[in-house]
Image (cartoon, coloured by chain):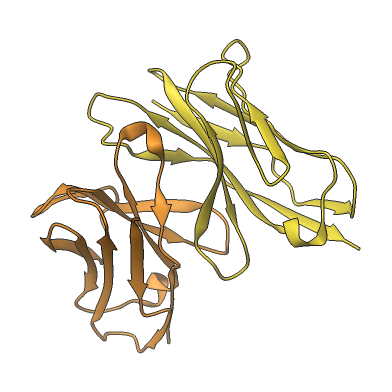
Chain colours: A yellow, B orange
């Protein structure tokens, strides 16, 4: 079956520090990969996505590259801000079959950025 | 553009009372619809999903049920709430399998 593993966290950084949140996956098919962000008290928002190997998703200064050879989709940002404090979820969607577009989520990583 | 509405935003219910949470999607047709529960602000548990009117698949047996009476309406229900039903409930929809989900803003349910 499909699974997503994220670094446990919580991650605590100072403002302007470099961020990496690791994500690896296993999939039976050829998945699309996603990062979602959840701000306190809110639903999840799509942050970025990649649909094929070597694609780079980017948004709001965050980036992640679909690495098929290492089955990874690590999230990075060069300079974090206090407003980036949130929970980040890595996810995959296995196309086709009977998956009906169901996403498999990682367990989430809490990021706290201090001024 | 597509939008998803979920209500209420917060709910406090006594143990043994019924529950009805509603989710509607606008601007698309025949969406896949999902109900998730999130405990302690972290992991997401898929409760139900639906690929069409009247079609409901349950991922986890529990005290809850779901219905899809209209194409873009998805309802989560319970006849008698338990304390363990407390949590943050999220509705989501998707189109193509590789597009990912769009989530509603969630309902914070506290059973007392």
Q: Residue at x 39, y 18 (%)?
A: A28
Q: Residue furthest top?
A: A69
Specify the quadrant of the image occupied by residue B7: bottom left
Q: Residue at x 22, y 67 (%)?
A: B75
Q: In the displayed structure, does residue A105 sit left or right of residue A70?
A: left
Q: Quadrant of the N terminus of chain B?
A: bottom left
In-front residue for pair A72/B82:
A72
Q: In the displayed structure, does residue B94 sit left or right of residue B89?
A: left
Specify the quadrant of the image occupied by residue A63: top right
Image location of residue B25, percent across then percent down: 27, 61
Compared to residue A25, the image places residue A107 above or below, namely below
Compared to residue B79, the image places residue B29 above or below, namely above
Image location of residue B73, percent across then percent down: 19, 64
Q: Residue furthest front?
A: B1
Image location of residue A64, percent across then percent down: 65, 31
Q: In the displayed structure, does residue B15 sit left or right of residue A27?
A: left
Q: Quadrant of the C terminus of chain B?
A: bottom left
Compared to residue B104, the image places residue B99 above or below, namely above
Q: How many marks?
A: 0
Image location of residue A109, percent across then percent down: 66, 48
In-front residue for pair B55/B16:
B55
Q: Residue at x 29, y 42 (%)?
A: B95
Specify the quadrant of the image occupied by residue A40: bottom right
């Amino acid at each position: 079956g499909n699974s997503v593993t994220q670094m446990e966290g919580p991650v605590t950084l100072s403002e302007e520090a470099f961020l990496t949140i690791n994500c690896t996956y296993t999939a039976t098919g050829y998945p699309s990969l996603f990062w979602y962000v959840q701000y306190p008290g809110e639903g999840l928002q799509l942050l970025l996505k990649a649909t094929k190997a070597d694609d780079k998703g980017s948004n709001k200064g965050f980036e992640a590259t679909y690495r098929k050879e290492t089955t990874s989709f690590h999230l990075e940002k060069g300079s974090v801000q206090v407003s980036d404090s949130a929970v980040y979820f890595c996810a995959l969607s296995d196309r086709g079959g009977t998956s009906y577009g169901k996403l498999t989520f990682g367990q989430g990583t809490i990021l706290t950025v201090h001024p | 553009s597509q939008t998803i509405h979920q209500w209420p935003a917060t709910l406090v219910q006594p143990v043994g009372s019924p529950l009805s949470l509603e989710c509607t999607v606008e601007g698309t047709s025949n969406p896949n619809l999902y109900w998730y529960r999130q405990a302690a602000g972290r992991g997401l548990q898929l409760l139900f999903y639906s690929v069409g009117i009247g079609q409901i698949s349950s991922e986890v047996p529990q005290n809850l049920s779901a219905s899809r009476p209209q194409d873009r309406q998805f309802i989560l229900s319970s006849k008698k709430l338990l304390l363990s039903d407390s949590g943050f409930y999220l509705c989501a929809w998707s189109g193509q399998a590789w597009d990912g989900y769009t989530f509603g803003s969630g309902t914070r349910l506290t059973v007392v």
